[in-house]
Image: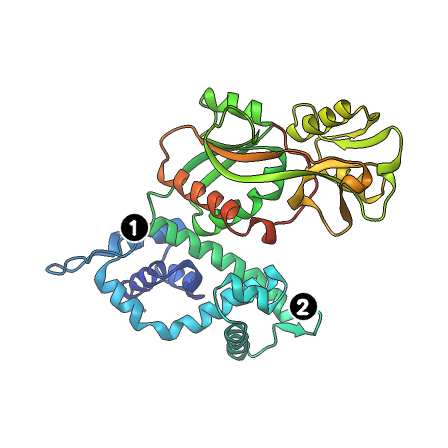
Amino acid sequence: MSQGKNVADIGLLAGRPVAEIELHLSDACASLGAVSLTDAIEKAKLSHEVPKGKGRVEPKTPNPIDAEVGARIRSQRRAIGLSQGKLAFVAIVDTGGFGSAAKKVNRTPSAVSMQIKKLEGQLRTSLFVRSSQHVALTQSGEKLLFYARRLLAMSNEVVAQLLTPDLAGLVTLGAPNDIAERTLPRVLKEIDDAYPSITVNVVVGNSETLIDRAAMGQLDLTIVNFASDSAVEPGELLASEQIVWVGSKGGIAYRREPLPLALYGSGCIWREAAVKQLEESGRRYRIAYASNHSMMQRSVIGADLAVAPLPASYVTEDMVVLGKMEGFSGLPSFDIRMITVTEPTPPMQIIIERIKAVFGGDMRSSLPRKTKCIPK
């Protein structure tokens, strides 16, 4: 193959959505005579020119694509089958099933099944052991997964370098401990997959500390927690949550005197609301377990050693909400807010949009629900 054709091949790969980049990307880079991926990208940039007399068309997306290359991309639809099959393959492994993988790649389950069959036919081997209960990788599937993840990462890097060079940089994001554990992993994973040139540094702490650090210019943006009835409403509202008393399902810890509590550290608005209610009602209590880690709270509630104030969305199947029948009154709600410290840069805007999507979309149904008190 000539160098010009290989450069065109890389242009085709970069023009496609990340999900559709061809598996032969590494071969195309190697045939350029490049000693590394970065070297291949530089060669592609130098050799990829728009012919004189041919202009550019206005793009439908913020990232401009050469009209001629775009036409060639559309003419290569026959190549989508393999790359889509590979994407479906990785999605099945990540989600644990064909149905959940179909949602992730925006396809029907039958389409995903057909893509896998096509991929297995091309590779002449079975990739999954299927049963009514679960899907497991075969030995060949394990081998393919290793290379598939490497090629996807390399493909993402090429797209980021050639199509979205302005979407690169460092963003420092602050978050309360629980948000960092429960919500951010999904956001950061999506950003890392789609925009590998964006680096996100996460600073975890209580909301009061995060606001102070933001004021000192140490954070670009931060998520904080505030009582819903607070006179101060910083930043933008992401979500509101109701705090509830939680105990072990079928447990008796709530009957004990003094009442054993599992609480987050000082400064937690959940802790403050719970303690205030107990003191006003005159009920005796003891802080039996205090920790900044959710595993402690989950463990002691599950073992019926204590009760705790938690957001309603955190209640799992082995827990129960304690109400008037058990001698508990309702607790207040709290707000989750996002503060943008500076004028958002393109990388910051990407992160802001993803955070809003998670909190405004399917946060309750799709995120792991854990038991941990967020600091104020």
Residue drawn 25% across the image and 67% down it = 71
Residue drawn 55% across the image and 75% down it = 113
- In the picture shown, does residue 280 fall above or below 184? above
Quarter where residue 329 is shown? top right
Categorize mark 2 by other alpha carbons within 10 Å: few (<14), some (14-19), many (20+).
some
Q: Extreme left residue here?
A: 53
Residue drawn 66% across the image and 69% down it = 135
Q: Is residue 57 left or right of residue 203?
A: left
On the question of residue 36 being in view, the answer is: no
First in sequence: mark 1 vs mark 2? 1
Disc 1 residue type (three-letter): Pro
Give the residue pinned by disc 2: 136
Rendered location of residue 39, percent (x, y): 36, 50
Disc 2 residue type (three-letter): Ala
Quarter where residue 245 is shown? top right
Rendered location of residue 300, percent (x, y): 81, 39
Q: Is residue 277 left or right of residue 284?
A: left
Rendered location of residue 195, percent (x, y): 43, 48
Give the residue pinned by disc 1: 62
On the question of residue 73 being in view, the answer is: yes
Secondary element at tag 2: strand
